[in-house]
Amino acid sequence: MTTPLLVLSNVGKTYPSGEKNTLEVLTDISLQLNAGQSVAIVGPSGSGKSTLLNIIGSLDSPSSGKVIFDSQNVAELDAKQQAALRSRKIGFVFQLHHLLPQCTVLENVLIPTLVNKENAGAEARAKKLLTEVGLADRLHYRPGQLSGGESQRVAVVRAMINNPRLLLADEPTGSLDRAGADRLTEMLINMNKNHGLTLVVVTHSVALAERMDMIYELTNGRLIRKK
Ligand code: ADP
Ligand code: MG
């Protein structure tokens, strides 16, 4: 039996709203994910997709329920241990690439390795990954010299540089044109298939969602399996 990489058990999330009220965003969410699997989370705007992704990535904590990542109960880790877990085991990609404009492509990709002590070979790995995604001749460009699609591919490589177990992507193709979105979709699929990367992607793109092993829709705070 394989131990799942991620287990959410009865996760709920409420936000304070007004003086006495609370807004219930997530209700009793349970989800189990094995290493190497890929999942799309779809749902209307405001349904709590980013909230859920942030809880999975320990950027936010649930109001109830439990998150087990790589056999560790995330709530039992202190802030420093949670930060270490995020930087070593989880990669994040957002709708906007958030690359540092004054740094080159290669420097941007290497930023996450600066916080880890063991980063020998990081530069070689960065070059290999950038080559794999067709950016070998862009290593010394700055983000302002790249297309939106190229920038987003750099952001994915940056998220992968510490060899994470899990990649979380929040509408990664949301700011791209069709060709850029298709290319990024292929890149994510390749990382999943060739590097065994476990993938959770929040997306409005049917094309991207359909490429994942599983699709869940988030509505009224609950996850419904669609595929
Ligand atoms: P989605 O990503 O699906 O568009 P979000 O997870 O961003 O949805 O937001 C879900 C709901 O939670 C929205 O109604 C939003 O206004 C609310 N919300 C998100 N973050 C906070 C917060 N930090 N404080 C209060 N309400 C929040
Ligand atoms: Mg969102």
Image (spheres, rainbow, N blue to C red):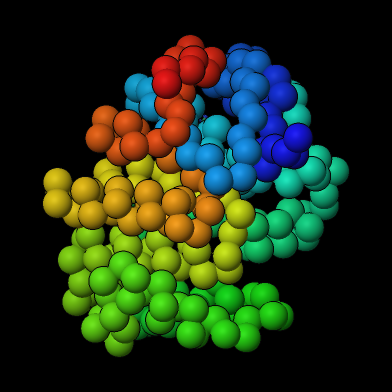
Q: Residue at x 52, y 70 (%)?
A: 161
Q: Residue at x 44, y 47 (%)?
A: 169
Q: Residue furthest right?
A: 76
Q: Residue furthest front?
A: 1
x%, y% of residue 144?
22, 74
For the residue pair 79 and 130, the one nearer the viewer reads as 130
| Image position of 160 (left or right of 104) | right
Indicate whether 139 appears above or below 156: below
Q: Quadrant location of residue 73?
A: top right
Indicate whether 59 appears above or below 156: above
Total marks shown come to 0
Residue 94 visible (yes or no): no
Q: Residue at x 21, y 48 (%)?
A: 182
| The C terminus lies in quadrant | top left
| Image position of 99 (left or right of 110) | left
x%, y% of residue 75?
79, 40
Indicate whether 115 appears above or below 182: below
x%, y% of residue 54?
56, 41
Q: Residue at x 18, y 66 (%)?
A: 147
x%, y% of residue 114?
60, 79
| Image position of 211 (left or right of 79) | left
| The N terminus lies in quadrant | top right
